Amino acid sequence: MDNNSAAKKENHKNTWSGRFNEPVSALVERYTASVDFDQRLAEYDIQGSLAHAQMLAEQGIISNEDFTAIRHGLYQIRDEIRLHQFIWLQELEDVHLNIEKRLTILVGDAGKRLHTGRSRNDQVATDIRLFLRASIDEITNLIKAMQLALLNLAEQHIHTIMPGFTHLQVAQPVSFGHHLMAYFEMLKRDSERLSDCRKRVNQLPLGAAALAGTSYPINRERVAQLLSFDSVCQNSLDAVSDRDFAIEFCACAALIMTHLSRMSEEFILWMNPAFGFIQLADRFCTGSSIMPQKKNPDVPELVRGKTGRVNGHLIALLTLMKAQPLAYNKDNQEDKEPLFDTVDTLTDTLRIYADMLTGVQVNQLVMRQSALHGYATATDLADYLAKKGIPFRDAHEIVAKTVQFAEQKDCDLSDLALDELQKFSSQIESDIFAVLTLEGSMQSRKHTGGTAPEQVQTAIQKAKEWLTAENLKHASMA
Ligand code: ARG
């Protein structure tokens, strides 16, 4: 008998059929089933079941023969799933019941003993935590790959001058490398947030059973050890019902996407010919079907757009959890699709970004011209005067008038002659020209976190050391 018809025959009655007089309608079956999407948890479900069964045998709750049979059965099921030979049945509702039913067909009564001291409530919570732990580890690595790409680009542009903006108006000259390293810092915090979230994800719910625990002499710590959980959830009601760890993960993901959407917005602006600062490699852009001149930054636009979707998933999970009474409620079945989509969107985005950064062409001349046109060194002139004893507010006013004059002459501050400058303040001397150049301005900001090239170089060095330390940490955890 093949897997499909055997399962159908076995399943003519439901798992809990004893108490029910009629089967659910086809619509209710479809409405309540989650197998279409939660089959994605199969590997973790099997991993959890193997640990649970081993503990049951070690505790003498099931026999060693039963455990051996369960293990063989689960291995076979895992192979069937990996080879896409496993037949998922909607009438068996979810990943857990599909696997358990198949196990029973394969190994008989031993399969029926697997669920001893366990409920789908603690089972599903365990599966999600295992899935999320693996996802966090993957995302952390992808963040590092993107950080490395950022570092490489920043290192090539320590001395490249661009206008730094506030209110999207030219503010002060900054090193393009410095600008890129701002994103390194954001991603570093994102990575730290994920590693903190991982601690709360990595707690074992199994043993909580349906809600109150179980009367079998189980050993939860042993299961935690077998599954590499840091420890066990301390309250059975909480263990089966709360999904705060998933919400927290979605909040981390939303922040990462938010950071990437900011960078995307900048790439989109910078690619616009009105800026003309950068070009993205053609593989990240598309043309227009009607306007032959167009090169559209589709990938950054989509990253910006998909941020909305990830933010939406965070709100979906918060709303799902809100006002749920203790303990488990079927509402929680709705946690999976937003969670899976968050992981998929985020991993794709990080992968694509790391690649996109390697193909950024920087138009240094245009960036520089743009800084020159925006009076980016006006603050430097004010600081120069203030250092000579003029109160800063007065210096600010003097420079505002000087800028107005340069604007009328349609030139940069550094293009004004010394006697023209001195009309605004007699304190101005010939050393002012070193201050008014873009390079002079940039080099003068040489404290920790400033844009002076020597500081950017130090920041890149520190970033490299941080990445190496992180890699070592992860290598020792693996
Ligand atoms: N498919 C369910 C979920 O995802 C598994 C737990 C079901 N438990 C229950 N008592 N109906 O949440």
Image: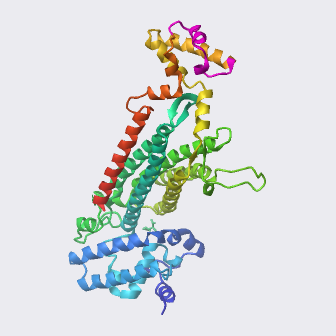
Q: Residue furthest right?
A: 290
What residue range appears in magenta?
Answer: 409-427
Image-quarter location of ligand 1: bottom left
Q: Horizontal and vertical percent for residue 102?
A: 43, 83
Please tell me in which quadrant of the rendered image residue 200 appears.
bottom left
Q: What residue appears at the point 62 percent right and 50 percent down from the top-left corner? A: 301
* 394 to 340, vertically: above or below: above
Q: Nearer the viewer, residue 349 or 433?
A: 433
| Horizontal arrangement in the rendering, residue 390 relative to residue 48 (left or right) | right
Residue drawn 55% across the image and 51% down it: 312
Can residue 37 be seen in the rendering of this structure?
Answer: yes
- Residue at (45%, 73%) from the top-left corner? 95
365 in relation to 465, above or below: above
Q: Is residue 416 magenta?
A: yes
Q: Nearer the viewer, residue 166 or 452?
A: 452
Quarter of the image for residue 325 reads: bottom left
